Image (tube, coloured by chain):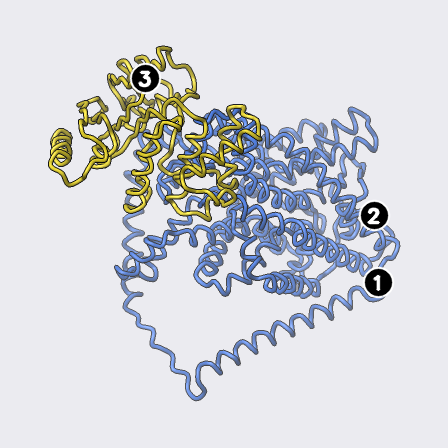
Chain colours: A blue, B yellow
Amino acid sequence: MAETDIALEYKHGKASYWIATLLVLMVAAVLAGLLHPVHISRVKVAPEIWQLPIDALWSLWRMFAAYVISLIFALSVGIYAARRPKSARIIIPILDILQSIPIVTFFPAALGIAIRIFGGGRFGFEVAAVVLIFTSMAWNMAFSVYDSVRAIPHDTIECADSFGIRGYQRLFTITIPACIPGLLFNSILSWAAGWFALTACEILPVNNATLPGLGSFIQHAQNSFNPLLMGIVGVAALFTVVIGLEIFIWRPLGVWAERFRYEMTVSTLSRDPRGILGWYRHGFLPHLMMRYIVTPLNVGVNAVISNVRGSAQKIVIPRMEVPGLPARTWFFVIRFMGWGLVAILFGFGIFHVYKIISGNIPISYAKQIPEVIAFSYMRIVVAYLFSVAWTVPLVLWAARHPKALRAISSVSQILASLPAISLTFLVVDIFIIKLKLGYLGIELACLFLLMNGVQWYVLFNMLGGVSKIPGDLIEATSAMGLSKWQKFRNLMLPAMLPSLLTGSLTAFGGGWNTLIFSESISYAGNYYHVPGVGWMLDVASGQTSSTLHPAQLSSLLLLTIGALIGFIVIVNVLVWKRLQRWAAAKFRLDY
Amino acid sequence: MLLKLENVSKVYQTDGPPATILADICLTVDRNQFVCIVGPSGCGKSTILRLINGLLPISSGKVFFKDKPLSGINLECAMVFQNFALLPWLNVMQNVVLALEARGVPVADAEKRAAFYIDKVGLGGFETAYPREISGGMKQRVGLARAMAVEPELLLMDEPFSALDALTSINLRQELLSIWADPNLAVSTVIMVTHIIEEAVELADRVVLVAGRPGRVVADIDIAMERPRLKNCEQFTRYVDSIFSLLAEF
């Protein structure tokens, strides 16, 4: 998660933060108006092992599609916001809110909307899945692009101006290269979040079918002859895919991305002296491929692009002369129309919400909403505390051992990509069936799964924070003879506090996401749950048998989602933003 | 004899063949001397300081401090850093006190000593200021106060004025000399690394030239001039010229 100066932005634009919240709620209301009740059923299909490679390919295609869309989104929005500070004042808070809300929990709703638009077939399902994965990937990448573009040294910009580097040339030679290191780090994080969203989408059956993929394979394993074995096989397949990606894509990309850094120091986290990149550069097979496939392809593509660019630059866009009224009046009219449109949308949304809710509220369920939110929040807090308890000491220890640091970051990237959902079966098997712990077992299972969704964010942000401690401060504290404890208290802890805070904020976001899948689990015909928001959402999306009819379900869903968003935003504003502002001001490393 | 380096070398492990930064450095420093180490960039001058302080391990050779071989960080030296190395979240007083705390000085005494040295460097009244609120010259004075507060036997300075503007440096050089000459203050021996030859000739009793890749001691020149030294006198210019011509071959 990029460390935007969200806290400082917030200081200048409190009003824009509330406007942003309002905008998000309005869009949510409008979308709610399009809600179509979805029949979600239990599917009893046993998976076959030979399906695994195909399933893996289906899962991968969804991830890539969502990633490409996220990339385009991140680059467009990030660069746009970085170039126009006024627009940024609205865009950044919107992204911030979207990042904190557990969008995956709205998958049933998203499905409903997609079905309304695309019809009930497979295509709508796929679209909904890709959109959902996109929403788990895009926000932190957009922040990263925004940060990177703003961090381009002023000298470079002046140089570009004075040499007349404009338009496409500037975009491709200066702006985008500046984004690459941050984008790479955030892509890895995004993919980890994406795997989670992917498995979440693949688990839900709609109209008696699920999407083919690794997630559904693992989920359906419970219907096979040996649930535990098949489940483990599925997870192993997922694991293999993730490791493969790490070795063949992320590592080499990481080394390549180093050259785009503006700082003169090399990050210890991505050095790969003799590894796969060496093989890429010198191995026999890659050499062949380079010579006969890649290079000719490169030359061809370059020729096409330069032709297009050449002719594009010859197009002169005439300055628009708007007749009649002066420009200021036109601007006023356009802005007025824009806000009018927004108000109309808002009206529609409210109307639909009213239609859904009025007369349909299942009181017995609805009045439990506040207390389930409280329960869930407490669970996340506990998971968060446990996560901090092991990640912080580990990172502090590893800060002094660069090799360990690298190992930890690689291993944790892989482990983080294993979505907690895929482990539900294992967890249920151990805690509930084998150990026979009853209700305590369910809570422990939920805690274990929650921690999986929370701890990686804390760990990654702390790892990022370690590399930000300036070397000469470390030297100075060594030279002064500070003991380990003194160094920790005076240097490492304060220096990493901003990263810890950012990590905590995203960790809580991840926690809400994981919650829905941790609080109610169905395995081998049994349904286990603990009271919480996840369970409530399950009920409201019709995944558990209850005595409510569809209209009531929709209104319950809406109420729960609304209450959840409200709660999260309030906690954000009251707690996290304040903390971030304080930390950013007191612990800035540049002076 | 306070410090002695015998055939000290430093080798770094890299991806390719190991890189030798320093080779066969021999250096002897006596008490009450002001020694400047001069040389072009990249020849390992700062590395020598870190070897003396114990921040980096020696690859071969021996370092003797007060006739005892060096092991680990040498707490009887104190270093002043090129980029100040102040903790941004501590104010001036807290930064200086930190160094004393590390030596186990009780808090009340630490604050008294810190206040004394902060005053000595001319920052009286700025004890509660944070690093981002003070200028570069003031930051380096804090660094100096912090180093002096622990009353070290040997003061190590790593290009202390190169991050400051020319006028501030001129002032700070004079102040450094008066602090060094002051018998009431603990600072008696100084080793300073610099790449500005005039600065070395103005301040030092001895100028040690380190040059080449790997860095070696090329010359050891005594500056036999009385202080205060006038920068436009003929003797000064001759010293500077001879050092320049010695370094020109590298």
Instruction: Say if labels 2 and 3 share a chain.
Output: no
Question: On residue A360, which mark appears?
Answer: 1
Residues under numbered marks 2 and 3 in contact, where contact means CB atoms less than 8 Å apart: no
**Disc 1 versus disc 3: nearer the observer:** 3
Residue furthest out toward the bottom: A324
Front position in the image: A517 or B105:
B105
**Disc 2 versus disc 1: nearer the observer:** 1
Callout 1 secondary element: loop
| Residue ID at (69%, 55%) | A570
The answer to whether residue B145 is above or below residue A591 is above
Rendering coords of residue A293 (x, y %): 31, 41
The answer to whether residue A219 is above or below residue A126 is above
Rendering coords of residue B217 (x, y %): 21, 22
Question: Which residue does the numbered mark 2 point to in the structure image?
Answer: A545
User: Label 1 sits on what residue type?
Assistant: Asn
Q: Is residue B95 left or right of residue A561?
A: left
Question: Which residue does the numbered mark 3 point to in the structure image?
Answer: B3
The disc numbered 3 marks a residue on which chain?
A: B
User: Label 2 sits on what residue type?
Assistant: Ser
User: Label 3 sits on what residue type?
Assistant: Leu
